[in-house]
Amino acid sequence: DGGITQSPKYLFRKEGQNVTLSCEQNLNHDAMYWYRQDPGQGLRLIYYSQIVNDFQKGDIAEGYSVSREKKESFPLTVTSAQKNPTAFYLCASSIDNGGSTDTQYFGPGTRLTVL
Amino acid sequence: ILNVEQSPQSLHVQEGDSTNFTCSFPSSNFYALHWYRWETAKSPEALFVMTLNGDEKKKGRISATLNTKEGYSYLYIKGSQPEDSATYLCAPQDNYGQNFVFGPGTRLSVLP
């Protein structure tokens, strides 16, 4: 089945540790995205990538880093510089991101709790 | 960054009731509007994408309208069922960027 997978579903880390969230898609989509959700707020864009080996900051990129070495993978690292990392993280992908209305398809999310 | 509002924040309806909720966004530089349904423990699922003023889209008992001049979209659910319980997100796009800006969502609970 085609889709987007995120692992793990729940993640606990101690304050000060970096942590990497996985996102894989087998939809052959060019564009991939990372969002963060906090209670009472809409999804906020962290980073996005339109093509392999290229990515752009979203609205709340501080304290996060990404890589896009393969088309199907877009891991997100939450660094110790992120002031409030506890949140629900969603990964998405779309066929293209070139000024189009392409639908974004979402993974199941990872809930990160920093203790 | 677009300022997107959705109202109400949450609502509870009885099975069989019809309901509607609103997404408001800046009307300037409008490009497209997306609606998503997000059920608990599942991934957000795309419902509609609309681009033209006056657009109406329908999927089963769910429909949506778009007014780009005044900057709003309505989502209607006719004869609500418990399986309609979800958070409904809207996400406008402006023509400065390709990315979506998601509203905070409307959480719908349909009581049997």
Image: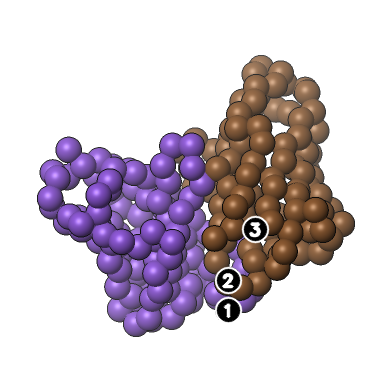
Instruction: State the residue at coordinates (70%, 47%).
Output: B24
Instruction: State the residue at coordinates (35%, 54%).
Output: A6
Q: Secondary structure at mark 3?
A: strand
Instruction: Tell me the tag on residue A98.
Output: 1
The chain containing the residue under callout 2 comes to: B
Q: Amino acid at mark 3?
A: Pro
Q: Secondary structure at mark 2?
A: loop
Instruction: Name the quadrant of the N terminus of chain B.
Output: bottom right
Query: What is the spatial separation of the Cα atoms under label 3 and label 2, in whole angstroms?
Result: 10 Å
Asked if labels 2 and 1 touch by Cβ distance under 8 angstroms, the answer is: yes
Badge 2 is on which residue?
A: B98
The chain displayed purple equals A
Which shade is chain B? brown
**How many marks are shown on the rendered structure?**
3
Asked if labels 3 and 1 touch by Cβ distance under 8 angstroms, the answer is: no
Instruction: State the residue at coordinates (70%, 68%).
Output: B29
